[in-house]
Amino acid sequence: MGRKINDSYVLAKTDLSNLTGGETLKVEWDTVNNGNLHWKDVDESSLEYVAPSHAQGSNYGFTTGDVTGPSNVIDRFAFSSNTTATDWGDLTVARRATSGHSSSTDGFTSGGGDTSTTIIDKFSFTSSSGASDHGDLLLGRPGSAGSSSTTHGFTSGGEPSSETNSINKFAFSSNVTAADHGDLVNTAHEPAGHSSTDSGFVSAGVSGSPVNTISKFAYSSNTTAADHGDLTDSLFGASGQSSTNYGFKAGGRNGSDTNLSTIDRFAFSSNTTATDWGDLNADTAARPAGISQTTHGYCAGGKVGSSYVDTIDQFAFASNVTATDWGNLSRTRGFTSGQQY
């Protein structure tokens, strides 16, 4: 039975009389109740500290890149309130169809462009001074997927001149050219990216035609990705979100060029077909940004009908219900990537 610690993380007094032989206490990050720490009674053999995931933020969501213009604007919106996003500086180069990555302190935007670019930009989550150049990908590519470990960003798929399956890896701590990190199961243009604690996942995309494949690759080793099941539909141009244990796909566009409102959920731990996890708020959305909080996923911007929009949708990781409106971006945006802090 968990016992929450107060928000200042001072260990509160607790009754230990209910512990039985072989048990001890575990200080665990509570991903359900606002990301606070709490006590948990566990078997001693499993004692560990579980840190908050880099793949979910607690404070703000960010979007970078935009098809309109294209644009260099970085937007920031609060997870705590339903309000319009604010301008958070600019990328070094205006571009669309970028990949988004997040460390504990900074956001990263890789690739993209009306023509392929190799640029990796880095911007601070706590200062709106704009992005700085953080090295280059091995291969310039618009329409790729972004995943993040605690130390590195991964840029997968895209279409430099034709669809590619290559994965690039770059360090958050140093400004150097990215390294090759193996390949996806298939080529993928406009796939969605997801992040667990030890692996990256890439779902859907165009491989000649839209596919429903989910690829899984290890952060620690440069090998070809493994097939990790399928989404409920073949599509491209979707947003990707990540909870601690699941990947989510929101929106997208199918082979009939129809925009989709569906949200899919798949388990990081098992190779199975994804399940339907509700729908976006009121509209379909293709090419939106995906952002992840500890308890909710966000789908920002994208194409609804024939026009790009500024809406932000929020959906719960814990329950299969229709998403709710969560304010607006500072402008209409599409072909956009997401970061979280």
Image: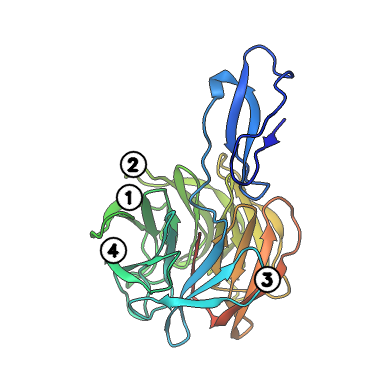
Residue drawn where x is 38% and y is 55% of the image: 154
Q: Which residue position is annotated with label 2?
A: 221
318 vs 205, left or right, is right
Q: Secondary structure at mark 1?
A: strand
Q: Nearer the viewer, mark 1 or mark 3?
A: 3
Q: Tell me the kind of residue under disc 3.
A: Asn
Residue drawn where x is 70% and y is 18% of the image: 19
164 vs 230, left or right, is left
In the displayed structure, 37 sits above or below 281; it is above
Residue drawn where x is 68% and y is 47% of the image: 33
| Disc on res. 137 | 4
Location of residue 196 in the rendering, given as x and y in whole percent from the top left corner: 50, 46
Q: Which residue position is annotated with label 3?
A: 82
Q: Nearer the viewer, mark 2 or mark 1?
A: 2
Q: Residue furthest top?
A: 21
Q: Which residue position is annotated with label 1?
A: 182
Gap between marks 3 and 2 measured at Cα: 40 Å
Gap between marks 2 and 4 measured at Cα: 18 Å
Gap between marks 1 and 3 measured at Cα: 40 Å
Q: Nearer the viewer, mark 3 or mark 2?
A: 3
Q: Tell me the kind of residue under disc 4.
A: Leu
